[in-house]
Image (cartoon, coloured by chain):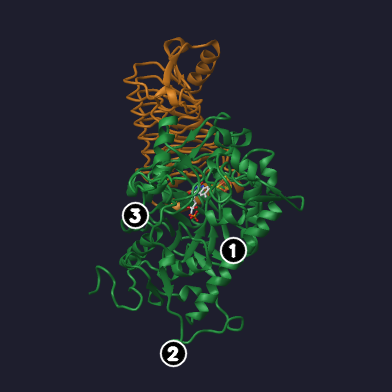
Amino acid sequence: MSHRRIQKEDHYTFDRSTIDYIQRAAATGLYEIRGLGAKRKVAHFDDLVFLAGSITRYPLEGYREKCATKTVLGTRYAKKPIELDIPITIAGMSFGSLSANVKEALGRAATECGTSTTTGDGGMTPEERQSSKTLVYQCLPSRYGFNPDDVRKANAIEVVIGQGAKPGGGGMLLGQKVNKRVAGMRTLPEGVDQRSACRHPDWTGPDDLTIKIKELREITDWEVPIYAKVGATRTFHDVKLCVHAGADVVVVDGMQGGTAATQTVFIEHIGIPTLAAVRLAVDALEDMNMKGKVQLIVSGGIRTGADAAKALAMGADAVSVGQGILFALGCNNETYLQRGEHHSAVADYETLGTAPGYCHHCHTGLCPVGITTQDEVLEQRLTPETGAKHVKNYLKTMNMELTTIARACGKSDVHHLEREDLVALTVEAAAMARVPLAGTRWIPGHSG
Amino acid sequence: MERIDLAKTPLRDLNQFLHHEVRKKKIKQVEIINPDGAHSIAVGVDAPVKIDVRGHTGYYCAGMNKQAEITVHGNAGPGVAENMMSGVVHVKGFASVSAGASGHGGTLIIDGDASLRCGISMKGIDIVVGGNVGNFSAFMAQAGTLVVCGDAGDHLGDSLYEAVIYLRGKVKSFGADAREEPMTKADEKKLAELLDRAGLKYKPKEFKRIASAKTLYNWNADADQEY
Ligand SMILES: Cc1cc2nc3c(=O)[nH]c(=O)nc-3n(C[C@H](O)[C@H](O)[C@H](O)COP(=O)(O)O)c2cc1C
Ligand code: SF4
């Protein structure tokens, strides 16, 4: 029998995903909208490693010697700064993108771990206020559900200027997720696509932001910290402008940051990696002599205690987690747990045209495991109790990993981790983080 | 009546007085003198109190107001009555950009003109402007009513949701998805009531109704939309 040779030459410019993209565009006439964050490989915290104690420095004993994790945010102007037991916080994710059960679960988990959780585009739900000891209330361009009663109930206010997944873009919640409750909270008809504004309605530019932040302080009697959140782009200048504008805390969200629904072209092509952004943000604070006076929260692809440790060593005061929380809740799992039994969700992934491990379909509102949904049946797949338990375990694990690393580096406080403890494994990471390439004294562009 | 002189009293003290003392002592009337264009005057008030500001105000006067009846006897800077929930804010002069931005309820009356983006993102507030409004007014307006007794600039009602605009004068251009619709009896009734609240003598019949064509409500690949 003659063997027919099938030629299989890879095409790097038009690879399979590019062909799929073009054919999808041709079929629909619309850009792809999806959830989660950038999937492309970029320099990240994995490309850094710690130099732990040995002879030059001595490490601390695990278990026996204490390693503090207490974190205070908003010490600049607020009468009541935020005091957290751990430097790992839960990022702003809207009710609307997440179910009410999940919002409640996040509040419970955060409270049990002594950390904060954050509202999102769509306002504050009573469930999350009740379940959260420390709740950060977002002031977004859309101002959906934003009201003075909730402002007064908040422990901090976060003015959202941008998000790492979509710097320069507005919110997006497709009609299928806009049920009666979500619509009511946002003052919109049920079922309409919500493409909310990318600029705030009542201010533009840094001088206006200064006045806006002052207004929020006046409304809250200067009691609670005001955060400013930016997507990572021109981070050095943006952080400086936030500090100038009077923010107590600056949140910098890198390009790997998650979203519930954004155009893929935004997610993959706009913004800079978290690793580059954290260095620029710290440079800005150091340049202004504001390190320690204005706190820095870093987010975008924080997954593990090691990521948190590296962000802190680079100069962040805390990190914030979005997608990691979704995965802890069961995102992309084959099964969901209901009434003590595991049920397969595979068929529901298939209905969405995906499979466990590949799903990024939060925008559809048909989350097979009940996280990013408003559907009455699907949301029952995750109860607040189960969700809270998993998120709490995840945060605790991260925190233990963080203190393990800090002790190994000889630090009795995780906030004592420093850049000098880090080296890079790749030239790119060395250049972005400006720490030496492992085994050398070389920082590309800065030495040698 | 309490009189507070902003030339002598720090703004922070004024706002804290309005937040706490006014409620505690059930004060019914407050006069603020020498505002001198200060920002954030009488923000976050939540009490049935009448506040008269004697002069011009800077940004965000009466921001997030609940219940209070605040009158600016002068011109108001950007974002007057932003995110107002209830009560009445009356600007006797002109208003700068983003008047009534994202307002959820209550009534904002501007005797003179209002600048760009009047009623942007409004969510239930009623705004009555005696004069003209600038470009992009009622941009992404979700709910409530904008009454314009003069003319409107470019892109009026761009990306409108359920808010309704009543315009007496001319419009330079409509924004995406905004269109003129016939006035109904219900429109005339609502408008008459709003004009009456603002003390204006115009007749509802002189106005046109502008509302959303709703073509942007849900994505349609064949409609050639700018999405
Ligand atoms: C489901 C989901 C919903 C989100 N909603 C909001 C939001 O309403 N407002 C906001 O500022 N950021 C929102 N974000 C972004 C997060 O606040 C945060 O910046 C990001 O998730 C951090 O990166 P990470 O996901 O890699 O941890 C959302 C993220 C996700 C995953
Ligand atoms: S499993 Fe749910 S939360 Fe995870 S990507 Fe899919 S839709 Fe989003």
| Mark 2 touches mark 1? (CB < 8 Å) | no
Question: Which disc, if any, is residue A204?
Answer: none
Q: Which numbered disc, 2 or 1, marks the residue that appears first in the sequence? A: 2
**Chain whose colour in the figure is orange:** B
Q: Which is in the foreground here, disc 2 or disc 3?
A: 2
Position of residue B137 relative to residue A268, above or below, is above
Disc 1: which residue: A395
Q: Which amino acid, mark 3?
A: Asp
Q: Nearer the viewer, residue A7 or B220?
A: A7
> Which chain does the residue under circle 2 lie in?
A
Disc 2: which residue: A55
Say which colour chain A has: green
Left or right for B202, reference B124: left
Q: CA distance from mark 1 to mark 3?
A: 29 Å
Picture quadrant where residue A89 is located = bottom right
Position of residue A389 measured from the top left corner of the image (x, y, whole percent): 68, 59
Left or right for A212, reference A134: left
Q: Which amino acid, mark 2?
A: Ile
Position of residue A253 relative to residue B199, above or below, is below
Position of residue A209 measured from the top left corner of the image (x, y, whole percent): 38, 48
Q: Is mark 3 within 8 Å of ligand 1?
A: no
- Disc 2 is placed on an element classified as loop
